[in-house]
Image: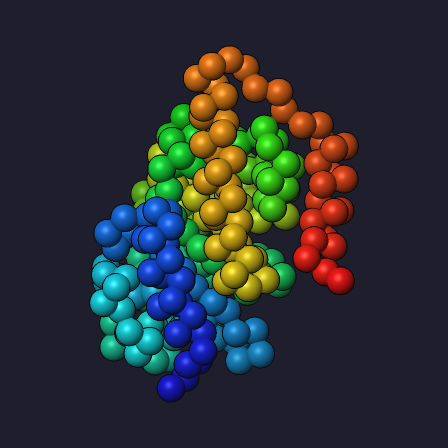
Amino acid sequence: MLLEQERKTIVAYGKKLITSQLTTGTGGNLSICNRENGLIAIKPSGIDYFEMQPEDVVVVDLDSNKIDGHLKPSSEIHFHLGLYHHRKDINAVVHTHQVYATTIACLKWELPAVHYLVGLSGNKVPVAPYATYGSKELSDNIMQTIGNYNACLMANHGLVTVGTSMASAFATAEEIELVSRLYYQAKCIGEPTILSDEEMKAVMKKFGTYGNL
């Protein structure tokens, strides 16, 4: 099966989207880019994560041509492809409708450095302007906003995270949900203190060696 490992990974992490409460129903989507082959494995449109099988995952090339699979690719294929073209360091994309991050996005707020774990994105999480889901306009808005960040809020929609692997993109989505919840709760009580750009540079430098011997 073409891109067998990538397709199996999409299935496994699709289930984790639900069990980690990062989306509901068939919402959200994931993809992995195999740079060597110039191919992308992406979740099919409208399928239940717990019913999805590896052979259901669609394989497309970087120009959106379907190479393998019997289902339609995700309706958000435009921004998945856009991100892979936009940055060569991106090998995986995760899109979610997680509650706290989406709450911040519905306010059209950026997520500031209220907690150092925002450093998985950068010194903040920027917010892209709203556009209809699945549209080229939405893709363009994300490309114009994300820059070198590893996460981008989508106004009135959700969150997209990127990484060198599915594991890193997914971990960023999880931690940004924690930071979003902390920001929400802190704003309910008062005005949270935001870490400086200088401190965030130090944090991100330490992240570069985290877990290494």
Which of the 4 image quarters holds residue 12?
Answer: bottom left
Of the pair 94 and 148, the residue shown nearer to us: 94
Q: Nearer the viewer, residue 137 or 40?
A: 40
> Which residue shows up at 53% across the image and 32% down it?
111
- Determine whether 201 is above or below 210 in the image: above
- Left or right: 128 as drawn, with respect to 26: right
User: In the displayed structure, would residue 44 be above or below residue 172?
Assistant: below
- Which of the image's four quarters has the N terminus? bottom left
Give percent across and percent down for residue 54: 33, 76
- Residue at the image point whose x is 53% and y is 80% from the top: 37
Image point 57% across, 19% down: which residue?
Answer: 192
Total labels: the figure holds 0
User: Which residue is situated farthest in the bottom direction here?
Assistant: 1
Horizontal and vertical percent position of residue 43: 34, 65
User: Is any atom of residue 42 visible in this view?
Assistant: no
Furthest-front residue in this view: 213
What color scheme is it? rainbow
Position of residue 35 measured from the top left corner of the image (x, y, whole percent)? 56, 73
Specify the quadrant of the image occupied by residue 85: bottom right
Asked if residue 105 is positioned above or below residue 59 in the image, the reply reads: above
Can residue 202 be spotted in the picture?
A: yes
116 is higher (above) or lower (below) than 19? above
- Residue 178, percent from left and from top: 48, 38
Quadrant where the image shows the C terminus: bottom right
Name the side, left or right, on which 24 lies relative to 89: left
Query: Residue sitting at 45 percent across and 74 percent down?
Result: 6
